[in-house]
Image: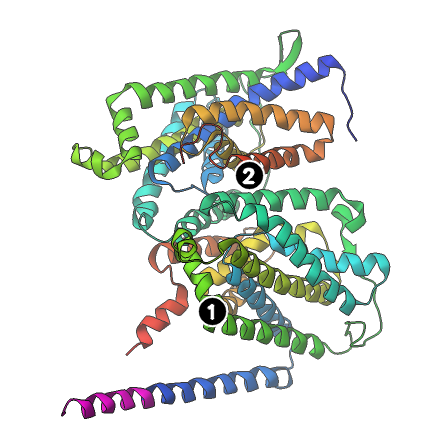
Amino acid sequence: MLTIPPPDVLVQGILSGILMGFVYALIAAGLSLIFGLMEIVNFAHGEFLMLAMYTTFWAYALFGLDPLVSVPLSAGVLFLVGWLTYRGIIRRILGGPMLAQIFATFGLAIFLRAGAQFLWTPDFRQVTRAWVQGPVRMLGVSVGLPQAVASVACLVAFGALYWFITRTETGVALEATAQDRQAAELMGINTERMFALGWGIGAACVGIAGAFLANFFYVFPHVGSLFALIAYVTVALGGFGSIPGSLVAGVIIGVIEVLGGLLIAPAFKYVAVFVLYLVVVLLRPQGLFGKF
Amino acid sequence: MGTGEPVTAVKAQEGTRASVRRVWGMGLLAVMLLATLAFPWVDRLPYHRDLVIRVFLYAMLAQAWNILAGYCGQISLAYASSVLQMRWGWNPWVGLGAGIPVAVALSMAIGYPCFRLRGHYFAIATIAIGEIVQTLAINWDFIGGARGLTLPFQKDSLLAFQFHTSKYPYYYIVLALLILCLLVSWRIERTRLGYYFRAIREDPEAAQSVGIPITRYKLIAMAVSAAFVSAGGSFYAQYVLYLDPDSVLPLSLSILICLLAVVGGVGTLWGPLVGAALLIPLSEFTRIQFGGTGRAVDLLIYGALLTLVAVFQPAGLVGLLGRRGRP
């Protein structure tokens, strides 16, 4: 059953797993941020990513903007999407039953996915002439340049997010709201604004990740579901609400995915990831760094 | 002295009002039952019959989901019965019979560890299990792999569970299954089991603290649910005679099933049936209107509806009626 690949293939696989892990980490960080704030899982997170990828693709197809240029655009659009989702939907279900909380974003996910299919057809689309393409030599093995760029950029964005949360006044206010909403309100924090901001930033994270992913990944209406599943697993592994946890977990999952594909069979690489999730959640339900 | 009489009078009045309502309810039920029994003889259009068969099937699956009110991709378990039947040439009824305990046992094996998880973790765990099962099914030749299974044609007979000259038996079989499922739910609703289930749903810790063994009762709910899902799956296999991972396993079917229950009314007896009666024809209508465009209009409506119901009417359409109808 197990096939041991030659060492250079193994090194190459692990390296690309780590690189992909940084992208997963940024996507998961957005999810984790929202959950930490109000204990709601955004089941439309993958569809947000899909919207970001389409934003990037259309900026390229219609205005000739390279995905690297449209990163701020995509982040901005997604910030707006997140903000509006909070104001339009989430605000109304904050105190509602668990089932309503799950199905509100679940329904939004189906709606967005079908909406993308309705507007832009189920065709697979691709940015064909990006600035960065082709392979690059790293540590004696080859990796795709777009993957490397996406990975480094996501790591930088992750660092910026962490800095924002821990070092700026708004970030600390966010953290305070996450810890205790009432106490934060007594300290004069506008928690309503913090919630909306949390959704905006959480969605902007996938805005950035999506823009870089569009550089080397096909864009189609269902693209989000796979990344979303991985994001849930990442967040659960790292611990719901823990931002640093999602970085560690993202890298672990990136590597496991590649090793599952290399050692067992490519068709089973996600099975390895989900089995890991089940094992972790059963042994340590709060995840590696979780508080809940 | 004087207060006793009016109170009794009021009580008596309430009593008669309740019994009048019960008579009306029974009458309505009887009319509905007669109408469904007579339907295939009155409306002989095969298309309508097929539509109603699917409404009943989905209503039953949604009701089964409703019993657990969980988020499992359990529909996959129904696969087991047709596999057994296919591989060993078993009779479909034996397959159906064997599928139920297999589904129950599998659901127990999956449910026991997962029920330690709460809320969102449980929902995500079931999605992960669903994905694992689907990947395995696509890559596992024993159950047909990605090509799926075609059930062999046989002569019409109740024993073979295949009816080609007249589809009426399918109609009555699925109707019987639906009625059985509704009866079981109705019994559950009114017995200690139902109160335990609701207590666990509202607050697991409180339920545990008053002495309800919550894991055992969650497992019971899951077993009942899995049994009906398995029966429904066997029926589907015999009706369509073709199964493949993409049409019976994916998240979209699980979504459809929860959607029917959520829109109709979660945790109510009639919610899933109301949801199925409204949404299955709606999906047919959009398919006819926009058929072949691949534009997923039905999903667009489903998604919007799901969000709207969750935000504005978490009790579902049945909840709306109940509020209006209460004096």
x, y percent for residue A174: 28, 30
**Residue stretch rendered in magenta on the structure:** B1-16
Q: Nearer the viewer, residue B313 or A50?
A: B313
**Residue at the extreme front:** B211
Q: Chain of mark 1?
A: B
Eyeballing the image, is B272 above or below A49? below
Q: Nearer the viewer, mark 2 or mark 1?
A: 1
x, y percent for residue A147: 57, 19
**Residue at the extreme left:** B2
Q: Nearer the viewer, residue A265 or A150?
A: A265
Prevalent SS, magenta region:
helix
Residue at the spot of label 1: B192
Q: Tell me the number on the disc at residue B6.
A: none
Eyeballing the image, is A47 above or below B317? above
How packed mark 1 is, by other alpha carbons closer than 10 Å (few <14, some 14-19, many 20 or more), is few
Residue at coordinates 69% horizontally, 50% vertically from top-left? B245
Residue at the spot of label 2: A282
Eyeballing the image, is B10 above or below B115? below
x, y percent for residue B275: 48, 66
The answer to whether one can see residue B291 in this image is: yes
- Name the amino acid type tagged 2: Leu
Residue at coordinates 16% horizontally, 36% vertically from top-left? A186
Residues at marks 2 and 1 touching, judged by CB atoms closer than 8 Å = no
x, y percent for residue A246: 47, 27
Let me know if residue B4 is in the magenta part: yes
Element marked by disc 2: helix
- Name the amino acid type tagged 1: Arg
Element marked by disc 1: helix
Tell me: A235 left or right of B312.
right
Coloration of the structure image: rainbow
Please identify the quadrant where the N terminus of chain B is shown: bottom left
Residue at coordinates 69% horizontally, 74% vertically from top-left? B170
